Image (spheres, helix red, strand yellow):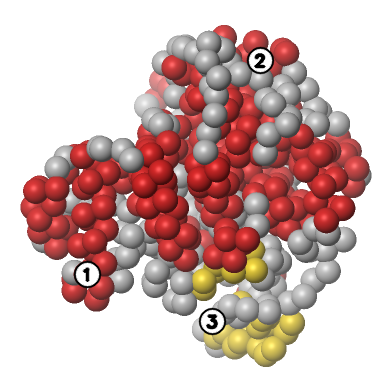
Amino acid sequence: MMENKIKQTGKAKLSIGSDDYELPIYEGSMGAPGIDVRPLYKNSGHFTFDPGYTSTCSTESQITFIDGAKGQLLYRGYPIEQLADKSDFLEVAYLLIHGELPSKSQDKKFKETITQHTMLHDQVESFFHGFRRDSHPMAMMTGTVGALSGFYHDDAHTTEDEARDMAMHRLIAKIPTIAARCYKYSIGQPHVYPNNELSYAENFLRMCFSVPAEKYKVSKTIVDAMDKIFILHADHEQNASTSTVRLAGSSGANPYACIAAGIACLWGPSHGGANEACLNMLREIGTVDRIPEFIARAKDKQDPFRLMGFGHRVYKNFDPRSRVMQKVAHEVLDELGLKNPVLDVAKELEKIALEDEYFIAKKLYPNVDFYSGIVLSALGFPTSMFTVLFALARTVGWISQWNEMLEDPSQRIGRPRQLYTGPTARDYTPISKR
C-alpha cells in the first residue's frame, strides 16, 4: 500500500463575499506546495475553475519529478542523465515500478520474466490482417493493445498483487512485439518473432529491420541509442496521456484498456507527435542555405511559422533529456556516416540556435523532440512510427502510474466539474408547435 508522504504546512484563507474559509496547504518532498480544495464545494458551494488542470494537483505521486526552471528530471530521485548514462531500460522500468534500483538477482529475475512474455497470442497476430494495408501504425497499436483486454480479462488485476504484476510484465514484454508488428505490417514485410537471447532494445530493432532472406547485425552504438531513447521517454510526470491512464484506471478498468487509452491520447500532435512535426519542418526547410529565411520567419511576430523542436512547455531552461539525445544523435550520425540534406539542416540549425542571441535570450534550446526525430530517422524509422516508439517507452511510466494509483488510499474515481453555460431549465415543446 502506498504511504502518503505529503505534509500539512499551513492554511490558505479564501474569502467569498462575507464568508471566510480555511484550506490546508500541503507540501511534498520537492516542488511547489498545493492548496487542498477538496472541502471547498462542501463548505462554500463553489468549485475551482482550471481548464487544462495546469494549476491543479490531481494526485500525490512518488515516481517522477520535474523542475522546469532548473531543467531537472528525476525518476524516483535519480537524475535522468545518470540513468541514461549508467543504466538500461529494463532496470529503469524496475525502478519506476518498484521505487528502488534492483539488486543483481532482482535485475536478473525481472529481465527473465519480461523475456518469457514477449510472444503474442496467435489470435492477436490475426488481428493485423483486419487493418487496411495503409493504416497508421498508431491506429493498429491502439486497437491491438486494447484487444489484449479480451485475452487477459482477470478482474483480479486491480485487487491482487500477483495478477497486477503479471499485467505489468506482459505489457512491458509485448509492447515491443506489437510495435514492430505494426511497422512490418505497414510496409508489407513478413513479421519477425522475438528472439529471447537478445536485449530488449536489440530484440526490438531486429523485429523491425531484419528480413528472413538476410542475416541481421546491428552495432552496439545503435542498440545503446535505442535503449537511451526508451529511458528518456519512459515517464514525464502527470502529462495528458499519463493523466488519461490514471483517469481510466480510476474506474477499475482493465489495465490493457487503460494503456490503450494512454496510447490514443499520445497520438495527438500536441503530445506525442512533436518529433514527427519537427522532422517535417526540417524537410520543409530542405537545404542549409534556406535556414536564414526560416530563422527570420520564426523571429517575425506577424508570421505564424514556428520552429518545431525548440523550447518546451515545462522546461524553461535546457531540457535535460535533450543533452543526452544531443550526444546520442552525434554518435549515431557518426556511426552511420549518412549523407542526408535533412540531417545537414538539423546540424546547422542546432548550431545557430545555440549561438543566436534571440534563441538564448528566450531560452529556445533544442529539445528532446528535435534530436529524437533526427536519430529515429537516421535509424530508418518513418515518421509514422515515431509516436509508436514514444508509446513503447512510455508504457513503463503509464503502468507505474497506474499501479501507484491503485495503491493510493486517497484514490477515487475521477470526476472533473464544469461551469455550465448552456440553456437554463425549459419545458418540452411538441413538434407540432415548433
What count of labels does the image hold? 3
| Relative to 46, residue 231 above or below | above
Looking at the rendered structure, the kind of residue marked 2 is Glu
Label 1 to label 2: alpha-carbon separation: 50 Å
Instruction: Residue 30: give x, y in percent of width and height.
Output: 63, 79
State the residue position of label 2: 125
Q: Which mark is residue 355?
A: 1
Label 3 vs 2, first from the N-terminus = 3
Q: Give the Cα separation between the discs numbered 3 and 2.
A: 59 Å
Is 38 displayed left or right of 297 in the figure?
right
**Foreground residue, 315 or 87?**
87
155 to the left or right of 390: right
Q: Which residue is mark 3?
A: 16
* Residue 351 appears anywhere in the view: yes
Q: Residue visible at 64% across and 73% down?
A: 37
Say which amino acid is labelled 3: Ile
Q: Nearer the viewer, residue 88 or 222?
A: 222
